[in-house]
């Protein structure tokens, strides 16, 4: 795991210390968990955005089988 130095305001540090004592989890674990959540949420948002951009990109293609024909092929298996 890589290490990173982080500067926090006194207010944030005090809040983290209080939370750490209350729930019995070290501050570095609280920060690590918060960063994991932040990254995960932003990666999911990026995936959703990409899916929205891709929506309908094949709508005007005429070289593809219709959905009904594809389903018929799947049903015969």
Image: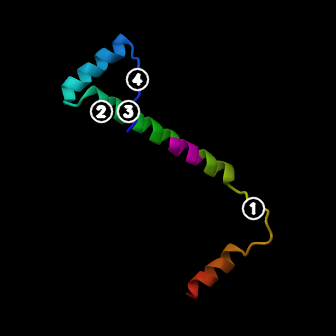
In the rendered image, residue 69, in percent from the top left (x then y), is placed at 68, 80
Sequence-earlier tag: 4 or 1: 4
Residue located at (62% from left, 78% from top): 71
**Image x and y of residue 50, in percent:** 63, 48
What residue is rendered at 30% in x and 32% in y?
Answer: 29
Cβ atoms under marks 2 and 1 closer than 8 Å: no
Ranked by sequence position, the earlier of labels 2 and 1 is 2
x and y percentages locating residue 38 in the rendered image: 45, 35
Single out the mark in the foreground, 2 or 4: 4
| SS of the residue under disc 1 | loop
**Quadrant, the C terminus:** bottom right
User: Against 44, is 63 above or below?
Assistant: below
- Mark 4 or 1, which is nearer the eye? 4
Mark 2 vs mark 3: give the one in front.
Answer: 2
- Taking 11 as reference, is 18 left or right? left
What numbered label is drawn on residue 40? none
Image x and y of residue 45, in percent? 54, 42
Q: Which residue is mark 1?
A: 59
Q: Quadrant of residue 46?
A: top right
* Helix, strand or loop for disc 4: loop
Distance (Cα) linking label 2 and label 1: 47 Å
Q: Which type of secondary structure does the marked residue at label 3 adopt?
A: helix
Name the mark nearer the viewer: 2 or 1. 2
**Gap between marks 3 and 1, in whole Å?**
40 Å
Residue at image point 41% right, 28% down: 4
In the picture, the disc for residue 29 is: 2
Does 29 sit above or below residue 61? above
Q: What's the magenta bit mostly, secondary-structure-wise?
A: helix
Marks 3 and 4: which is nearer the front?
A: 4
Q: Which residue is mark 3?
A: 34
The boundaries of the magenta stretch are: 43-48
At a point 80% along the width and 70% down the height, the residue shown is 62
């Amino acid at each position: 795991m890589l290490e990173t130095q982080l500067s926090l305001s006194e207010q944030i540090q005090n809040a983290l210390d209080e939370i750490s004592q209350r729930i019995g989890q070290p501050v570095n674990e609280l920060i690590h968990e918060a960063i994991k959540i932040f990254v995960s949420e932003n990666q999911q948002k990026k995936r959703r955005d990409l899916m929205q951009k891709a929506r309908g990109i094949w709508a005007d293609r005429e070289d593809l089988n219709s959905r009904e024909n594809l389903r018929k092929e799947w049903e015969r298996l």
